[in-house]
Image (cartoon, rainbow, N blue to C red):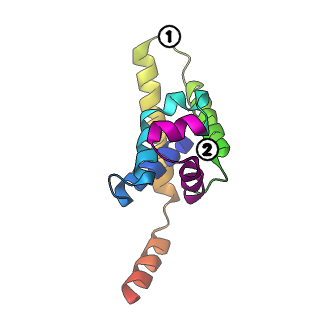
């Protein structure tokens, strides 16, 4: 679940930092809206759906720290598979409760991973320059 949050956060960060109609914004929006479809799509089809060149998809992957589209696809597929293992309950209410618990755990993990000394040092460096 943490990995899913981290990946989608990367897409949301792209949306927040890019102009609305930028290439990276189009790609991030597509990915957020089609997380379930990624296993069935190739780079050519994704480029067509996003109205961008295949090289733009490759560049996007590199900008978010991946080697290529295949690595992005494998990462999203593996995250989805891991997430589906969190609940085997047949009752929707139980699945919702288990999902909510995992989201809370993920937020706590992120909170614990933040090093405020590092953030303060970065802020001082930014202010200095």
Q: Is mark 2 on a helix, strand or loop?
A: helix
Q: Is residue 38 visible?
A: yes
| Number of numbered tags placed on the structure image | 2
Residue pictured at 56% horizontal, 32% vertical: 38
Q: Can residue 1 be seen in this view?
A: no
The magenta segment is: 44-63
Residue pictured at 46% horizontal, 20% vertical: 95
Q: How crowded is mark 2: few (under 14 residues within 10 Å), some or many (20 or more)?
A: many
Q: Which of marks 1 and 2 is in front?
A: 2
Q: What element carries label 1?
A: loop
Magenta-drawn stretch contains 81: no
Magenta-drawn stretch contains 58: yes
Most prominent secondary structure in the magenta stretch? Answer: helix
Q: In this orientation, which residue lies closer to the viewer: 47 or 30? A: 47
25 w.r.t. 91: above or below: below
Q: Label for residue 38?
A: none
Q: How crowded is mark 1: few (under 14 residues within 10 Å), some or many (20 or more)?
A: few
Q: In this orientation, which residue lies closer to the viewer: 46 or 70? A: 46
Question: Which is more N-terminal, label 2 or label 1?
Answer: 2
Instruction: From the top left corner, tell me how far across and down residue 41 is, in percent.
Output: 58, 31
Instruction: From the top left corner, tell me how far across and down residue 15 is, in percent.
Output: 38, 52
Q: Give the residue number, with chain letter if any, for mark 1.
A: 90
Marks 1 and 2 sit apart, C-alpha to C-alpha, by: 30 Å
Residue pictured at 37% horizontal, 60% vertical: 17
Q: In this view, does 71 lie to the left or right of 51?
A: right
Q: Label for residue 72?
A: 2
Instruction: From the top left corner, tell me how far across and down residue 108 is, in percent.
Output: 46, 48
Q: In this orientation, which residue lies closer to the viewer: 28 or 57? A: 57
């Amino acid at each position: 679940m943490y990995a899913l949050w981290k990946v989608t956060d990367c897409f949301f960060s792209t949306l927040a930092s890019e102009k609305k109609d930028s290439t990276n914004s189009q790609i991030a929006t597509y990915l957020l809206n089609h997380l379930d479809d990624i296993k069935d799509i190739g780079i050519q089809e994704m480029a067509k759906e996003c109205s961008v060149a295949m090289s733009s998809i490759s560049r996007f992957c590199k900008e978010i720290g991946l080697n290529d589209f295949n690595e992005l696809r494998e990462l999203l597929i593996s995250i989805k598979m891991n997430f589906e293992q969190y609940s085997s309950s047949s009752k929707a209410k139980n699945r919702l409760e288990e999902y909510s618990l995992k989201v809370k755990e993920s937020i706590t993990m992120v909170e614990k991973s933040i090093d405020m000394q590092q953030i303060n040092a970065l802020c001082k460096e930014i202010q200095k320059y």
